[in-house]
Structure formats: C-alpha cells, structure tokens
Amino acid sequence: MLTYEEIVALEQKYLLNTYARYPLAIARGKGVYVYDVDGRRYLDFLSGLGVNALGHAHPRIVKAIRDQAAKVIHVSNLYYNEYQGLLAEKLCTKSGLDRAFFSNSGTEAIEGALKLVRAAGHATGGPEKCILIALENSFHGRTMGALALTGQAKYRQDFDPMLEGVRFVPRNDVEALRNAMDDKVCGIVLEPIQGEGGIQESSSEFLQACRQLADQHQAALIFDEIQCGLGRTGQLFAFQHFGVVPDVVCIAKPIAGGLPLGAFLAKERFAQHITPGKHGTTFGGGPLTCRVALEYLAILEDENLLEQVRRVGGYFSQKLRELVDKFDIAVEVRGVGAIQALQLTVPGKPVLEGALAKGLLINVTQDTVLRFLPPFLLQEKHVDRGMRILRRLIADAQKQEKAAARVAKRTAPAVA
Ligand SMILES: *Cc1c(COP(=O)(O)O)cnc(C)c1O
C-alpha cells in the first residue's frame, strides 16, 4: 500500500491541479466513520459532500453491488435493463412527477433539465421562449450550462462566454423575480436550500411566488435538489418540506450509495417535448447504479431513516444553537435535518483543520460557514462527540480573534 506521502507526491505530479485537498488520504470506511491510510479514525460529518448518506460499507449496498456486478454492470441504452424502469417508477411515485431521465452526475442532470425546458419553451412559445431565471449565490455544477446558471463569479471567471439568456435574481426577493419574469422565460431554476452557497433556505412564500409566476407565464419550475434532496431535509424531496411542487426536480449525490448516478424527474407537460434522439447518455441508468439506487431507497424506508434524520437533525440544530449562545464568533444556525450550517464571523478554515486533526470531518463554504452534511445514520451520541470537538475549537478561534483584535487596537494609529 502507498504511504500518505507517496499518494500526495503522485497526485501533485500527474493530476490536473483542480483540488486544494485537505491532508487526509482515506483508505476505508464503516458506518459514520472513515479511516486514513495509517488506520486513524474520523467521525464523518460530511459524508463525501452529501453522497454517503448511508455511511460507508452498508452491508445491503455492498451486497447489491456484488450481486449485480457479477451479472451485468452496463448495458447500452440501446437495450432495456431490468432496473431503470423500476427506479423511475419509484422516484415518480414518491415525487408525484411523471417521467425520469438518468444521468451520471448532478451537473448532467441540470444540463438535461435545461435542454428539456428549452425544448418545451420552443414548442409552446417559439425560439424566443428560451430565457432562464436563476438565483444569485447559487451552485448548479461545473459544465457550461450549469455554470451559466451558477450565480457566483468565482466559478465563472475565465470561462466566458457563458450560455446566453440567463437572468439572476436574489433569493427570496419576490419583487425582483416578478420584474425578471415575462413570456420569454422558459424556466426558473433554484436550489430550495442553497448548499455550496452556505446553506441558505428559500422561504415558502418565495417558492410559492416562483410556482405562481411559472404557471402564469407557462414556464417550468426546476428545483435543484442534488444536495438537499433524497432525504437530507428529513423528507424524501426537499420540496415536500417546503410544500411547493416543481415541474422538474434534479437529484444525484446520495442516490446510488456512492456510485455515480443522477436524474431529473419531470411533469408530463414538459417531458413530452423530448423524443428519441434529442437527449441521451452512454452510462446513465445502467443496471448496476439503478439497482443500487433502488436498494438505497428501500434502506431509507426499512431503517426508518427519514425519521432519524428529523430527530437527530433537531438535536444537531439544538447543539449548534448552544454554540451560538456561548460564543460571539458563532452567530447563526441554518438548515434542517442532515443539511446544516454554523455561520461564523471569522474564517472557518482553522476550525476545519483543527477538527481534522482531532478526528472529525467537516466542511467550510463561503469562507465563514461551517457546513455539515452528515450521514443519515448519525445518532445523538455521534453529535455529542462531534460537538465536544467543535466547542473546543470554536473557543480557541474566539480567543485568537479577541487577541488579534486587542493587538490591532493597540497598534492602530491614534485618531486625532
Ligand atoms: C454537487 C451539486 C451539483 C453538481 O453535481 P455533480 O455531481 O458534482 O456534477 C449541482 N447542484 C448542487 C446543488 C450540488 O450540490
């Protein structure tokens, strides 16, 4: 087996320089824990950025992969396979939407949804009906179409020109949305809870206004639930948490237990505009990923995991709020269930690095937001364990912040 240093050296020499990785090489995982190449254990409050919702090495997922791999892993979309229709049926039944398309990732689910609503727009309003509305501070993926919908300059710079016809409005600003809306709009795209944007929730009123304006202008309402969906809010779909049903919903991250699979589900009114030859993929919807996704959904039910997400998520919020009460640098708790954040007034990186050193995996987004996307298997005792580590690190960060402030005050030029 390679040592940590060997792994790092190889990647630094041969990989495209896309990732600023943390100093950890993971060798294996079990439940809510992962283990590095030296055998050290880490409590996982991040679950592979929301992918490993069932933790690691879930026995039923392992068995489904073993069984299916020995039968058939891939068949072309030129042919039928046993599991794609079953999975589509399950997702449509659970969501109330009508048809599914399977991709290999989140960003590809977004691309497919974009093509669908453009095709529907053209069919009902001519080529002019092509405008998309997206939110500022959003994140929809890294391919060119998804990037064009991503309202954060840092992801877009260097890659212009973007796809044409995207209008951005601030989240929860009904007035701005109303002003951006007209009959040329074919779709409104948003994350009900912005993930990468710092766990920022849409209000139900805003989502209702989106629904009403989309209907009024014959546009599609598209929810990107790639991060917040499939159980993370404690409901299978985040829109069930907010009580607003979209025309199209995009899902991906946890759906196939860590194997790459994404999907969008659409109402027939929009879905009908895609006919053979207009869209497709080589890998998406293969029998291995679809079978594992069926197993994922079955496990959520059999182990009553949505109930657990609601219960443990409530406990998690309560513990985060205690940090806000205790420390000046911790100012707000956001999110619900297994998608939560603690807003700091200082950069979160030192807390993240301290947590890693103490055996806890968390994430920082938007510089000052600690983001938590734990596996649904998390129990109260794991929350307690993680919070003990966080409490100490936030106390340290606060001490440093206060010391720095004292120095700054002392060395500041006297005001005349
Ligand atoms: C991760 C993510 C994507 C992109 O998914 P990939 O599988 O990385 O392409 C899109 N939207 C949201 C909200 C995400 O969190």
Image (spheres, rainbow, N blue to C red):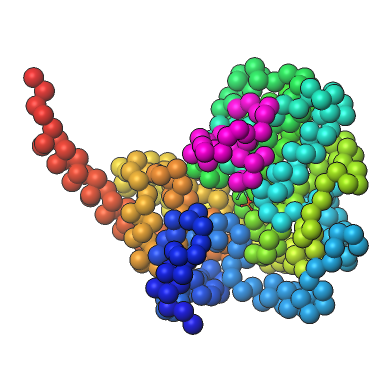
Residue 392 locus on image (x, y percent) = 31, 58
In the displayed structure, 41 sits above or below 349; it is below
In the displayed structure, 118 sits above or below 58; it is above
The reply to whether residue 204 is in sight is no
What is the number of callouts on the image? 0
In the drawing, does residue 17 fall left or right of residue 128? left
Q: In the image, which residues are magenta?
A: 141-168
Work out which quarter of the rendered image holds the C terminus and state it. Answer: top left
**Horizontal and vertical percent position of residue 374:** 54, 59
Magenta stretch contains residue 148: yes
| Residue at the spot 64% in from the left edge and 73% down from the top edge | 58
> 93 or 247, which is in the foreground?
247
Q: Quadrant of residue 23?
A: bottom left
- For the residue pair 155 and 51, the one nearer the viewer reads as 155
- In percent of the image, x 53 and y 68: which residue is there? 32
- Looking at the image, which residue is at 62% across and 43% down? 140
Magenta segment: does it hold 69?
no
Question: Measured from the top left, where is residue 121 in percent x and y?
Answer: 82, 29
